[in-house]
Image (cartoon, rainbow, N blue to C red):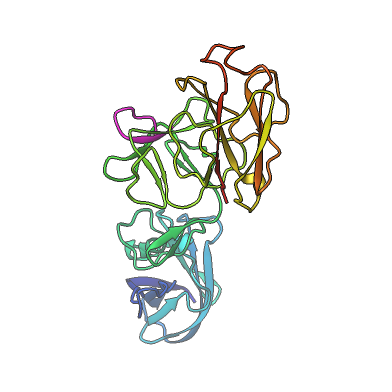
Amino acid sequence: MQAKVTILAIIALFMVATTATADVPHMINYQGALTDSSGIPIEGTKEMKFEIFANPTGGSSLWSETRTCTVKNGLFSVVLGEVGQIDYSVFDGSIRWLQVTVEEEVLSPRKELVSVSYAFKAHHAQQADTAFHAPPDNDWVISGNNIYRLTGNVGIGTTSPSQKLDIVGGNIELSDDRWIGDDAARPRIQFDSTGSDIEMMDADVGIGTTSPQQKLHVEGNVLVNGELNVDSLVTGFDYSSGWNHVEAGNFETWTHNLLGDASKYIVFFDGKSSDGNYIHQKNYGTNYTALGYTGAEWGRLTNTTITVWRGSRDDAGALPPSDDWYYIRIRIIKNQ
């Protein structure tokens, strides 16, 4: 039997989904007319094989399935993809050709598939302004109003980010003209050229407060492990001895009773000359035990007492008034 197939129409893709997240069915509704070599319509049940090729002749099929079809008055209708799903990758934007085999007889020529079949490409769109559903790409996760990723680095201004967020050649604007970066014209947090220091320019820093009154304003306690270097006025001491005279060559033990961990204390040690015109400061946060002939030191710090020494030659007669430690004052921040 010589048969030929006439393509009447490629009706449609089943593109209707019941919900916004439903997948696109990978099927094509296909109809044709089958006649013998004399043009007489064929009747009965026929086994047909349908194949999709990338070329009008030759090559390997990209998809195929075999169906038993009922032919009436030469007409048949079949939904391709019901037996073997048509993967969306079959339609990549290139021309595709359909080959039909009836009872082991290959009908030729192959038929070019018209554009409606390329609606499969919409499942794997080259460009889309809006999508009702998009499979995750394993990069970003959307959770409510948040978006995040757990692995990898993000680069802005660079194609090879080396950190979780790597910004090259620009600043970060926070709000109200506040920046992180190196723009000298704006209030900013700036990293110095070595990357070892952070500078806050033209603004006060508040910790525990939204209205800082000084360059650093802390509401609450401050814990310092190590020395605290202060070049100006410090207030808020937990203990102050006031100015006391200590005889040259003598030591005195003063009681502060601050208790707690004495290793965390911050000690401010001040001296004043005999004429009252000169103030000396040294040894912040340090427990000294060595004593020279001039000047003064402190040490033997406990959580209840502290000891001060004054050198044997530190007196008004041996030193100019500007150099002696005639009066001594201890001030302590408990720091805990």
Residue at far left of view = 176
- Which residues fall within the magenta stretch? 181-190
Q: Which residue is at 34% across, 29% downward?
A: 183
Q: Is residue 188 magenta?
A: yes
Looking at the image, residue 205 lies above or below residue 279: below
Measured from the top left, where is residue 207 in percent x and y?
Answer: 42, 48
Looking at the image, residue 49 lies above or below residue 154: below
Q: Is residue 125 magenta?
A: no
Do we see residue 158 in this rendering?
Answer: yes
Do we see residue 172 in this rendering?
Answer: no
Magenta residues, dominant SS class: loop
Measured from the top left, where is residue 270 in percent x and y?
Answer: 54, 29
The residue nearer to you, when weighing 67 against 74, is 67
The residue nearer to you, when weighing 217 against 45, is 217
Numbered disc total: 0
Measured from the top left, where is residue 300 in percent x and y?
Answer: 71, 38
**Going by the image, does 11 lie left or right of 307?**
left
The residue nearer to you, when weighing 54 against 103, is 54
Q: Which residue is at 51% across, 33% downward?
A: 243
Measured from the top left, where is residue 37 in percent x and y?
Answer: 41, 73
Residue 180 location, quadrant: top left
The residue nearer to you, when weighing 158 against 195, is 195
